[in-house]
Structures are given as C-alpha cells and as structure tokens.
Amino acid sequence: MEMPLSASDYNQLRAFVAVGELLSFSRAAEMLGVSPSALSQMVRGFEGRVGVQLLLRTTRSVALTEAGDMLLRRVRPAVSELGSALSQVRRTRDRPAGTVRVHAFRSAAERYIAPVLGRFAAAYPDVVLDLTVDDAVVDVVAAGFDASLRIGEVIERDLIAVRLGPELRQIAVAAPAYLERNGTPEHPRDLVDHSCIRWRWPGRALPYAWEFFEKGAWFEVTVDGPLIVNDKEMSIRAAVGGAGIAFPVEYMVQNLIAAGSLVALLEPWSVPFPGHFLCYPQQRQMAPALRVFIDAVRNPEGLPIDGKGAVSSQR
C-alpha cells in the first residue's frame, strides 16, 4: 500500500535528498537555510517514517546505505520536478497569467471594458479574458464567473461592489414624427395609451415594467406596444424610426436628443438610480490575473503600454 505524502513528509524528503546529494549535513543545511541540528532531526524523522536507515553517519563523514542510494536515485527527479513546478506557480505572482471569466451587462461592457481591451491584451499577454456580454442577472459564484459588471440595483449582498461611474437615469424618448401622429404623454400613466417599445430581461417571461418616481416613491407602469426587444440599442433605433416610445438609459440617447432625432419625455418623473458597479466575490488571496483586470477597469489610464504589466496591490 502506498504511503500518502504530507507536507511534513515532503520537507523531510527534500532534506534527505539534499544530504544524500552533498553527503554533508552542514552544506545541506546551508543550502536549505536551516540549522544542521534541525536538518538531522528531519532526516531521522524521515528514516523513522519509512522504517529503513538511509544514511550512515560518523563524526567525519556521511554515506548512503544501499536503501538510501536506491531511494535517492528514484526520488531525485520527482523532487526536482516538484520544485520546478512550485517555482513556476510562484512566478505567476510577478506576471499575471490564466483565464479571467467576466460577465457584463452590455452597457457596462461597452463603456468600461471595450475601451481597454487592446491595451490590456498588450500589457498582459498571458491573461485570457473570457467575456460574456448580456443583460441576464446571473449568480456570479454559481455560474463560475470571477467578476461581473452590472447596475447597482441587482447586486448580490455577499459580493464586493466597486462603483465605476455616476448614477444613471432612464428616460422616455420618441421621434418627433411619432409625437406629431400620436400626441405627447403628459404623465407616465398616459403611456398606457401609446405604442411603447418594450424590453425584456434575459430569462424573464414578461417585459420590464417602466419605473418612475413621484412623491417620494417609485411606481411602475405596465406599457404595451408592437415591439419587444432584448437589446437597448435596437429599441433606440426603433424609436428613431418612429415605431413608438422607448425607455433607454439617458447617456445612450443624449446625442440623438441634441440632434433632434428624439424628444425627451416625462423628465420630472425620471430620477437617477445606482449606476454601474464592478462586483467580485470576497477572497483571501486574489489571483493576479483578476487583480490586474479589476485595476484596468477601475483605472484605464494606469494600464502599462510597454507590454510589461505590473501587479498592483489588492484593494
């Protein structure tokens, strides 16, 4: 029956290999950074563990027994390979590597991830970003993601959430031609008499009910219309084309409003809500690859441009 190797066994085995190769306790102790007496105890403990004498000791010399010589020849390559593997793992602390799985709402991905992708790839060539972009509200941990970018209203309580930008505001908009044909709603409840371009959260059966604010409280209006989409950009294009009233985030249509392609509606009832956040699970030791991704999203100006990414301290 094979003996399982514990951490203590590995240290003792490493001590035996050092002494067996150098045939000197003092030189082996110096190489390992321990005292000769501590090294002698480790080797004796290892001999007791295997139940065989491995070294012959005198006051002047050290020699391998037949069993010790056989064991040294068998385990030396394995110990060397294990040491190399550990050194390689430790090097990842200095050069981030591996895959970072990220889930992001479309608006957040376009605003905070897309602008840094080129420089991030150049700075951290050993990091693979596995990016899923959709508006589904997923359980970050259960779905196997390392981080998520989403709006503040749908963040799980056990996640660390870092604000990325200002508050957001949804606003009803329509094309001038639509308003000429159908009139302008004076209150959010008037929307029930209009053609509205509805939006559905991924995975939800019913379209999203539009939310407005009045007299210190939020209220919902269940709208109707000829078009249901799961993409905010599509709803904006449909509104510009005169298909009905859309309800996008304001910054997405500011230029269209300024150009006269869309008209802002019902603004007194549209108030800000928590904007985009970068979320990730609490962890004792953050992987360097995840750490540099978080730093890049939070502070894109700090991305190195010479292809030599440095690991910042965990926040």
Image: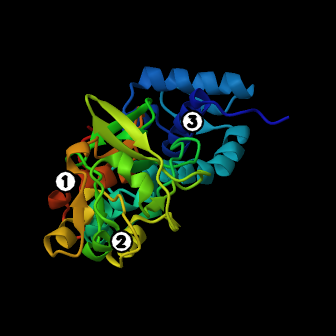
Where residue 126 sits, quadrant-wise, is: bottom left
What is the quadrant of the C terminus in the image? top left
Return the residue nearer the eye: 45 or 296.
296
Q: Amino acid at mark 2?
A: Ala
16, above or below 204, in the image:
above
Q: Is disc 3 placed on a helix, strand or loop?
A: helix
Residue drawn at the location 42% of the way across and 25% of the way down: 36
Q: From the viewer's perspective, tell me whether residue 22 is left or right of residue 43.
A: left
Q: Amino acid at mark 3?
A: Phe
- Tell me how far mark 3 sits from mark 1, CA to CA: 50 Å
Return the residue nearer the eye: 26 or 270.
270
Return the residue nearer the eye: 91 or 63.
91
What is the basis of the colouring in this image? Answer: rainbow
In the rendered structure, which disc, 2 or 1, sits on the residue that comes first in sequence?
2
- Tell me how far mark 2 sits from mark 1, CA to CA: 35 Å
Pointers 2 and 3 in contact (C-beta within 8 Å) = no
Q: Which residue matches tag 1?
A: 299
Q: Which residue matches tag 3?
A: 16
At label 1, counting other C-alpha atoms closer than 10 Å, the crowd grade (few under 14, some 14-19, many 20 or more) is few
- Of the two numbered discs 3 and 1 in the rendering, the one whose residue sits closer to the viewer: 1
At label 3, counting other C-alpha atoms closer than 10 Å, the crowd grade (few under 14, some 14-19, many 20 or more) is many
At label 2, counting other C-alpha atoms closer than 10 Å, the crowd grade (few under 14, some 14-19, many 20 or more) is many
Residue 271 is at least partly visible in this image? no
Return the residue nearer the eye: 296 or 265.
265
Labelled disc at residue 217: none
Q: Which residue matches tag 2?
A: 239
- Of the two numbered discs 2 and 3 in the rendering, the one whose residue sits closer to the viewer: 2
